[in-house]
Every structure is written in structure tokens, then in C-alpha cells.
Amino acid sequence: MSSGLKFELKPVKEIPRGYRKSKYDLIINEFIDSGEKLVSVDVEGKSVNYVRSQLGKRIELRGLEEELKASSVSGTLYLEKVS
């Protein structure tokens, strides 16, 4: 029976995750553009561990794990280019 509706079904492995911009992307973008290999990061009003976690999530979501690393040592947050 033809309803006049044309469509096509295509197999997919998974539903793609949406990419939303985050304020933490601004930090990552500025670091990438800076040309520096290692910087300390201070975000007013946010804990070091919270910001490290958010930067890590953004790095992973953007597929930059091979290029960037966020870490904290003795209460200081660092962004590092690893490649």
C-alpha cells in the first residue's frame, strides 16, 4: 500500500551525541591559539577540581585527548599540550 510518503531507513551503530559549546571551550581554544605548551589556569569562583573535570570532559568530547591534558597539582590547575 502506497501512502505517498517517501522515506529510507539506514542502519547506524549509535545515536550521535550533540556538540554544545561550553564556556570551558573558550579556555581550551585560547590555550590552543596561545602557542604555549604549558599554562596554569585560574577560574574565578570555581574550584580547581571542578574546572579540571569540566576541561577534561570538553577535551574528551572534542577528541583532543591525544593533544591536550588538564591536571592539578597542589591546588593549581594546568593545561598541557602533550603532542
Image (cartoon, rainbow, N blue to C red):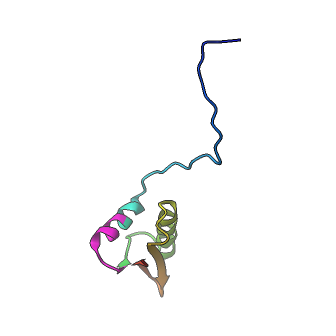
Pinpoint residue 83: horizontal percent, then vertical percent: 42, 77
Numbered range of the magenta stretch: 29-39
The answer to whether 5 is drawn above or below residue 12 in the figure is: above
Q: Does the magenta segment cover residue 33?
A: yes
The answer to whether 11 is drawn above or below residue 35 in the figure is: above
Q: Is residue 10 left or right of residue 56?
A: right
Q: Which residue of the protein is positioned furthest toward the right in this rendering?
A: 1
Quarter of the image for the N terminus: give it. top right
Q: Does the magenta segment cover residue 49?
A: no
Pinpoint residue 15: horizontal percent, then vertical percent: 61, 46
Q: Residue at x 42, y 53 (%)?
A: 21
Pinpoint residue 27: horizontal percent, then vertical percent: 36, 66
Q: Which residue is drawn at 46% across and 67% down?
A: 64
- Tell me the quarter of the picture where residue 77 sits: bottom left
Of residues 38 and 75, the one nearer the viewer is 38
Q: In this view, does 43 lie to the left or right of 3?
A: left
Q: Which residue of the protein is positioned furthest toward the left in this rendering?
A: 34
Q: Which residue of the protein is positioned furthest toward the bottom in this rendering?
A: 74
